[in-house]
Image (cartoon, rainbow, N blue to C red):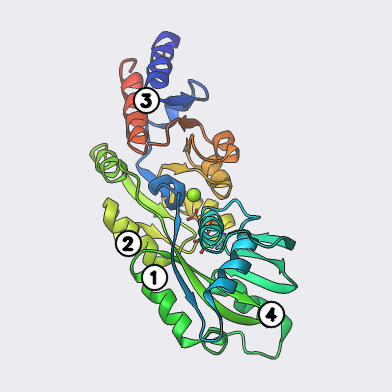
Amino acid sequence: ATPTALMVGTGRGAQLGILIKGPEVLESTRRVDTVVLDKTGTVTTGRMSLYETVPAADTDEETLLRLAGALEHASEHPVARAIAEGAQERVGELPAVERFENVPGLGVRGAVDGHEVVVGRARLFTESLEKAATDLPAEGHEGTALPAELIAARDRAEAAGRTAVLVAWDGRARGVLSVADTVKDGSAEAITRLRALGLTPVLLTGDNEAVAASVAREVGIATDQVFAEVMPEEKVAVVRRLQEEGRSVAMVGDGVNDAAALAQADLGLAIGTGTDAAIEAGDLTLVRGDLRVAADAIRLARRTLGTIK
Ligand code: ADP
Ligand code: MG
């Protein structure tokens, strides 16, 4: 690669909204055959809004929103922001949080108004119950701890492609909140362009299977190329496994939970509207967060190298 060609490629990249860490990055694009895409904030806008509030039979909507909203107010997660904003709109000022803990990939827990509150995947709640009462059976515990009406509300929301989280306090499930995210405008077209470059798109997310499948269908990713309910620390293992299968992997992500996977990938593309951790870990940054530019970046890099070889 001549320095001039690489400089021209880098300059053209900047015009397209692609920041390249160094000319050597372009080399990595030559072999890439698989593009792993994070879902939330990468394929979707990540700007979620509260869609539905389903209190349990013995709970009122206002209390549900007050306690869940207060706790989520302390979290930066897109799901959390949607819940905190939705709660504020509906019930006004939220109580102060007395204690707060973020559990990556699962949710949040803490103390609000003297209650021990949990908001997140059902697993976070059932696991905290198991810790409190070790005599309860670990398997099939969800069935006894979660009222059927809440399981039904969650399953309905997830089947429709929404993310549903459980709200519990003082050891009892109190309601389900669902939030809706939307696929970014250019995402389906981006998948078409990536395929045209001979790349296989893969969807990787911590969100549940139903939501992941629904987003995959909407943008044109094959359902057998979807990895859902992947814990943040397991994302890097998925990339490594694909590499062990002999694939050369580009990863596109925006979150703190994507940073390790971005670093592990043969080519890491960070969404510029995402977190600093992702941008630092990536080899290049898609400044405007438009997924179509991921395809442009790979095409540009190959063309830049093509002029030399
Ligand atoms: P993704 O990989 O799609 O960016 P995460 O790994 O950050 O998603 O989160 C996975 C899942 O964990 C979310 O879909 C949500 O169900 C749950 N979760 C994570 N953080 C929170 C939170 N602050 N409040 C409620 N649920 C959360
Ligand atoms: Mg994300």
Disc 3: CA contacts within 10 A as few (<14), some (14-19) or many (>=20) = many
Mark 1, residue position: 157
In this view, the mark in front (3 or 2): 2
Mark 4, residue position: 170
Quadrant holding the N terminus? top left
Which dot marks residue 214? 2
Specify the amino acid type for callout 4: Asp
Pointer 1 and pointer 3: residues touching (CB < 8 Å)? Answer: no
Disc 4: CA contacts within 10 A as few (<14), some (14-19) or many (>=20) = few
Q: Secondary structure at mark 4?
A: loop
Q: Is residue 66 left or right of residue 194?
A: right
Q: Can you give x and y, in whole percent of width and height, for residue 102 in the image?
A: 66, 59
Q: Is residue 146 left or right of residue 162?
A: right
Specify the amino acid type for callout 1: Ala
Pointer 4 and pointer 1: residues touching (CB < 8 Å)? Answer: no
Specify the amino acid type for callout 2: Ser
Q: Residue at x 37, y 75 (%)?
A: 156
How far separated are the C-alphas under marks 2 and 4?
Answer: 34 Å
Mark 3, residue position: 301
Q: Can you give x and y, in whole percent of width and height, for residue 265 in the image?
A: 49, 42
